[in-house]
Image (spheres, helix red, strand yellow):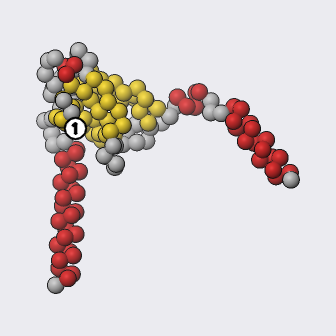
Amino acid sequence: MATRRILAASLATLLAFGISPALAQQANGVLAGRATDEARQPYTEYSVQLRDPSTGQVVGTVALSAQAQFSFNNVQLSRKLLVELTKQGKVICTEGPYALSTGLTSKTDVNISCGKTPAALWLLTAAAGTAAAVAVATRSASQ
């Protein structure tokens, strides 16, 4: 019976106080930068999105400002994210992945530039290579 009372009191305390706002704010960071190397005027026709490379899910989208700048102010820490420049729903360029942490809660110097091979292309190439290797190994084993 004492166990039930302690459990009930603990749950009531947890529900009454919840999570401190200061602790909740520490769980997020800022990822920001510019796209002046790739986007052309008017910059407001472009968007920037964050994509989780492990799931392929888009976790946030913002429009470029008139100065080709972007900012994501609520980025989950310890999560790797790709930064993609898009226009009319098409991905033009990919940077990253970037991961914020408790030691680095802000990265504001991201420069979207397609001068190098996009990370998404590397992921696609790696997946294709893995599939080809599995196919060859399966075929070799069956012969």
Quadrant position of residue 62: top left
Q: Which residue is drawn at 31% across and 46% down?
A: 56
Q: Is mark 1 on a helix, strand or loop?
A: strand
The correct choice, above or below, for 130 with respect to 108 in the image is below
- Given the current orientation, which residue lies at the most extreme top position? 66
Q: Is residue 108 visible?
A: no
Nearer to the camera, 99 or 84: 84
Q: Position of residue 36 (x, y in %)?
A: 18, 23
Sort mark 1 into few (<14), some (14-19) or many (20+) by Cα contacts within 10 Å.
many
The correct choice, above or below, for 3 with respect to 42 in the image is below
- Given the current orientation, which residue lies at the most extreme front position? 88
Name which residue type carries label 1. Answer: Thr
Nearer to the camera, 89 or 60: 89
Relative placement, left or right, of 50 versus 123 is right
Figure quadrant of the C terminus:
bottom left
- Given the current orientation, which residue lies at the most extreme right position? 1
Q: Which residue is drawn at 86% across and 53% down?
A: 1
Q: Where is residue 37 in the image (x, y as percent from the top left)?
A: 15, 26
Q: Is residue 76 visible?
A: yes
Relative placement, left or right, of 9 versus 61 is right
Q: Residue at x 43, y 29 (%)?
A: 74
Q: Which residue is drawn at 36% across and 37% down?
A: 59
Q: Position of residue 13 (x, y in %)?
A: 74, 36
Relative placement, left or right, of 128 versus 9 is left
Quadrant position of residue 91: top left
**Which residue is under mark 1?**
94
- Given the current orientation, which residue lies at the most extreme bottom position? 143
**Number of dots carrying numbers:** 1
Q: Position of residue 43 (x, y in %)?
A: 19, 19
